[in-house]
Amino acid sequence: MNTASRRTGPRPTDVVLNRALRRLPAPTTGYTVHREHIPMRDGVTLLADHYQPTGEVAGTLLVRCPYGRGFPFALVFGRMYAARGYRVILQSVRGTFGSGGVFEPMVNEAADGADTVAWLRAQPWFTGTFGTIGISYLGFTQWALLADPPPELAASVITVGPHDLYQSTWGVGSFALNDFLGWSHLVAHQEDRPRIRAGIHQLTAQRKVKRAAAGLPLGAAGRALLGSGSPWYESWVEHPDRDDPFWDALRHPAALERSQVPVLLLGGWQDLFLEQTLAQYRALRDRGVDVAMTIGPWTHTQMLTSGLGRVTAESLQWLDIHLRGSAANPRPTRVRIYAAGRGWEDRPDWAPADAAHAWYLQPGGTLATTAPDPTGPAVSFRFDPADPPPTVGGRLLSPAGGYRNDGRLHRRHDVLSFTGAALTDDLDVCGVPVLELDHSSDIADVDLFVRVSEVNARGRSVNVTDGYRRLRQHTGPVRIELDAIARRFAAGSRIRVLIAGGNHPRYAANLGGGDAPISATRTRSAVHTVRFGESRLLLPADGR
């Protein structure tokens, strides 16, 4: 079933965007847009906008989205591709923007995606193959489909798309409060009427989320912000265990184990889902799947702003090869990364070398390449859950993420800081840094936040990579993997290591009492102690 179509030529926004995205091929056709009503197996109907080129059709693309079918998704995934010959079905997922049913994040995407493909097969214009594209949640809907891939699916382009919600929310052992309370707040108000009201909510969202994140207990404080919206929020906070069956519908490891569909992965070094993008690449590569990956210097939101030109150009190139059958301009290598300080590089694989540069923590707050006397005095700090170290930059969903001046963390009394001497030569690093700590605490349940920053010749400190881990009943040395990086530390700059007991509101503060996070209010400070001799930072050497 469809409703009346409208013929569409270039819009002013399209013209402006095309000028901004000069690397894209020129539009080749006009297109029409009409509404589709797509039935699901349980009788629910989902709405979609059907972009149909008026000229030759290169292939069909399916985009499944919870954020509506207007700006920016209509432009980025609808008009941009339709104008270059692709038929696009831009669908609102269950319970959003006119689609029937109730929105339960991630829960229904596998079944609804399969039902949408069944509808595609029955259309007279369907040629027998299709591709999928999309960013973030739109990427998760692709993984849900790839868990049991339909034979007609010929290619996927997944931009910063997770396959495992547990890993994103509780993967480090502490709840990712800022990101998922913030996301729930966005979804709770995205369909407010009038639309100006929804816009006002988004303009004030960061401040409101930060205020709510400071409240206790987590469940009640979050509900006070969300009102009657986003009823799933408490269920996420209530299930911190990785093996809890609650998470089974919210992750799709089978997609990495079964699918043979060619996949292009696009990510950012400062994106929330970076570690999943890298894991997806490794899993598919190891099984011999046709997979490629590009990682740029972007945050999650920058994939639709400063990263959009490269993301769209590489997406079109991938789809042209696998759907259109074009042999022009294939990728020269599987992997393309942006190495800070050097620029874009094509690499045969993501396989960082095992060799590492070791930097030992020293008494007095310095770093050196030789180990200090292990019998010297240790250093301690007290973590107070009522006044946790604040989040400054890093891999966030919100616009506050990314590379930031983090000098104020270095100056806090509850943050240990170790800074090396100025580098005499450039230092090239690629891979996953590791911090090994001879650490103990005076209570059994604590968190550790660690960061590596680069301090330039003027003394400005900017975050490079973070790591976080909850320690329960832990004894002995601690090994924390930080976020993967590709970077040149410039000669004259200094490497800095920060160690703290929290990073709030990115992660919910560890209250120290061991109580259930959803209802905990009892707090207990923790004294952390770091001993010297074996405590060191391992920076992976660039094995190009």
Image: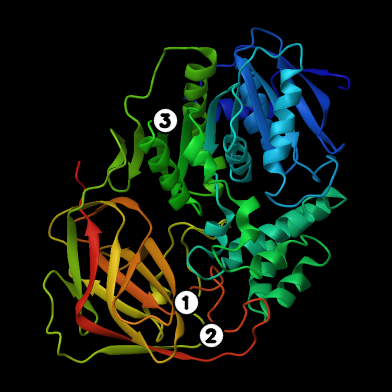
| Disc nearer the start of the sequence (3/2) | 3
Q: Which mark is residue 502?
A: 1
Specify whether residue 340 is in view. yes
> What residue would you read off at disc 3?
289
Q: Is residue 418 left or right of residue 257?
A: left
Q: CA distance from mark 2 to mark 1?
A: 8 Å
The percent position of residue 274, horizontal first and vertical second, equals 45, 50
The percent position of residue 312, horizontal first and vertical second, equals 52, 30
Specify whether residue 422 is in view. no
Q: Is residue 110 left or right of residue 40?
A: left
Name which residue lies at 78% across and 56% down.
189
> What residue would you read off at disc 2?
385
Q: Quadrant of residue 149?
A: top right
Furthest toward the top, the residue is 56
Amino acid of disc 1: Gly
Q: Do the residues under discs 2 and 1 have CB atoms within 8 angstroms? A: yes
Q: Do the residues under discs 1 and 3 have CB atoms within 8 angstroms? A: no
Name which residue lies at 76% across and 71% down.
223
**What secondary structure is found at the residue carrying circle 3?**
loop
Amino acid of disc 3: Val
Is 2 or 406 nearer to us in this picture? 2
Amino acid of disc 2: Pro
Is 392 or 58 nearer to us in this picture? 58
The percent position of residue 369, horizontal first and vertical second, equals 13, 69
Q: CA distance from mark 1 to mark 3?
A: 39 Å
Few, some or many C-alpha atoms within 10 Å of disc 3 (few <14, some 14-19, many ≥20)? some
The percent position of residue 267, horizontal first and vertical second, equals 46, 43
Few, some or many C-alpha atoms within 10 Å of disc 2 (few <14, some 14-19, many ≥20)? many
Q: For the C terminus, which image quadrant?
A: top left
Q: CA distance from mark 3 to mark 2?
A: 46 Å
Few, some or many C-alpha atoms within 10 Å of disc 1 (few <14, some 14-19, many ≥20)? many
